[in-house]
Amino acid sequence: MTNLAPRGCGIISLVIGLAGMTGLGFAQLPTGTILGGVRDASGATLPGTTLTATNTETGLSRMTVSGEDGSYRFPALPVGRYEIRAEIPGFQTSVRSGVTLAVGQEAVVNFRLEVGAVSQTVEVKGEAPLVNVTSSSLGGLVTEDNVADLPLNGRNFIDLTFLQPGVSENKNMTHGGTFTGSWFSSNGAPLRSNTYMLDGAVMGNFLGGATSSIANTTLGIEGIREWRVVTNNFSAEYGLTMGSQMAIVTKSGTNDFHGSLFEIE
């Protein structure tokens, strides 16, 4: 009689392993989250409110309904500028525009609806609060404005990472080509303790210390929109190394024509 237990255990282990890898991939996507709560003028929660988040750059739209406690959440949204609309029968429609969502950010946008017709709209323009009230992680964000405004000799995006608190550069002084690229330490951790993720995929050379490839090249600055460097106290969605976590988002198309130009003197 054939014993199928070992083969069955192997299949179960494989399925569990793939499920874990899938969860890790979703957790490290180059996205952000918009969340908050909906209340009326008296402060009572409004469950069943329909909320719509629209990316004003691409037209991407997502819809959800607030829960019993009036809370809502839009997870895994692409970075960009958003408009959020909240509407429920018996109350005026509220629109919050000008919300810029960055990679790895949890933007809290709360609504307070006034009694009235749904056809009546109250529009509020403004950014989400800069104070992070949902995470205790430490680090910094390099935005597309930073990339455009700050001087960048050599056009290597890693150079802007050295401006983050706790990050110290390690110059490559060898000539044999073994240690290529720009290496750095985060809060005194070893040089190989940094994880680089490009649009959710782990990248880096085989030595595990820099973002340069086996061909000694890095992604050009023109292909990057923004990136976040988490240097300490990062959440469970990150892992693999003890130093820093870098989440890089590449540029993508929008509904508007855009481009860039630079010259070398």
Image: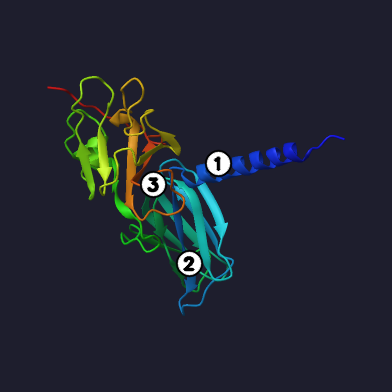
Q: Residue 45 location in percent, x, y?
A: 52, 74
Dots 3, 2 in contact, CB < 8 A: no
Q: Is residue 246 left or right of residue 60?
A: left
Whether residue 48 can be seen here = yes
Query: Considering only order in the chain, which callout, 2 or 3, is on the residue closer to the N terminus?
Result: 2
| Gap in angstroms between the C-alphas marked 3 and 1 | 21 Å
Dots 2, 1 in contact, CB < 8 A: no
- Viewer-side label of 2, 1: 1
Residue at position x 37%, y 54% in the image? 99
Q: Amino acid at mark 3?
A: Val
Q: Residue furthest right?
A: 1
Q: Which mark is residue 21?
A: 1
Whether residue 164 can be seen here = no
Label 1 environment density (alpha carbons within 10 Å; few <14, some 14–19, many ≥20): few
Locate the C terminus and report the quarter of the image it occupies: top left
Q: Which mark is residue 37?
A: 2
- Counting labels gives 3
Q: Residue 79 location in percent, x, y?
A: 40, 45
Circle 3 is placed at which residue position?
103
Kindly indicate the quadrant of the structure image that contains residue 6. Answer: top right
Q: Which mark is residue 249?
A: none
